[in-house]
């Protein structure tokens, strides 16, 4: 679509240049008046095409943003709120959303609120999951020796 608008702008520019040339060659006042009218029409058409092109760029940016938001939403839809330890709430990968060879994992609830998927990393078998982004620990399992 943008190439069509660009072609239209090029054609209008050429028509304007030709019209200017005709006006310069003819001394007849009527021809010069008609040429001036034609130049006005061409200028108006160019302005409309420029506005259309700007609107297309704006709509493309909105579409790109909407696609990004949908992709992020789809990624978060793979998780469900879980309580792996009493009082500890994190987001757990849903088993039905698990990809082949993807391990079961939890993501940071704080980072999720900011729109970022950050997998919690186990820390030395103490039952904690560390978020490498916000540096918070969440209890995701039992510490050794706790029943």
Image (cartoon, helix red, strand yellow):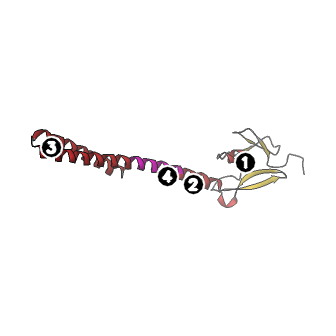
Q: CA distance from mark 3 to mark 4?
A: 46 Å
Q: Nearer the viewer, residue 101 or 134?
A: 134
**Which residue sits at x=38%, y=50%?**
52
Give the residue number, with chain letter if any, for mark 2: 70
Q: Nearer the viewer, residue 62 or 93?
A: 62
Indicate the position of residue 45 as horizontal and vertical percent values. 29, 49
CA distance for labels 3 and 2: 57 Å
Q: Earlier in the sequence, mark 3 or mark 4?
A: 3
Residue 106 x %, y %: 72, 50
Mark 3 or mark 2: which comes first in sequence? Answer: 3
Which one is nearer the viewer's eye here, 29 or 125? 29
From the image, tell me which residue sits under label 4. Answer: 63
Q: Secondary structure at mark 1?
A: helix
Q: For numbered disc 3, what is the local secondary structure?
A: helix
Dots 3, 2 in contact, CB < 8 A:
no
- Residue drawn at the location 15% of the way across and 43% of the way down: 32
Q: Quadrant of residue 114?
A: top right
Alpha-carbon neighbours of circle 1 within 10 Å: few (<14), some, or many (≥20)? many
Is disc 4 placed on a helix, strand or loop?
Answer: helix
Q: CA separation, marks 4 and 2? A: 10 Å
* Boundaries of the magenta span: 53-65
- Label ID, residue 32: 3
């Amino acid at each position: 679509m943008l190439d069509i608008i660009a072609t239209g702008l090029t054609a209008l520019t050429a028509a304007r240049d030709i019209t200017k040339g005709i006006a310069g060659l003819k001394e007849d006042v009527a021809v010069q008046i008609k040429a001036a009218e034609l130049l006005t029409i061409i200028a108006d058409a160019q302005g409309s095409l420029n506005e259309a092109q700007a609107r297309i760029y704006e709509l493309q940016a909105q579409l790109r943003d909407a696609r990004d938001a949908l992709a992020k939403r789809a990624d978060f839809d793979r998780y469900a709120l879980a309580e792996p330890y009493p009082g500890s709430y994190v987001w757990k990968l849903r088993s039905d959303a698990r990809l082949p060879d993807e391990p079961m994992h939890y993501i940071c609830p704080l980072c999720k609120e900011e729109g970022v998927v950050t997998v919690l990393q186990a820390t030395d078998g103490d039952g904690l999951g560390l978020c490498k982004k916000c540096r918070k620990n969440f209890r995701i399992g039992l510490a050794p020796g706790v029943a």
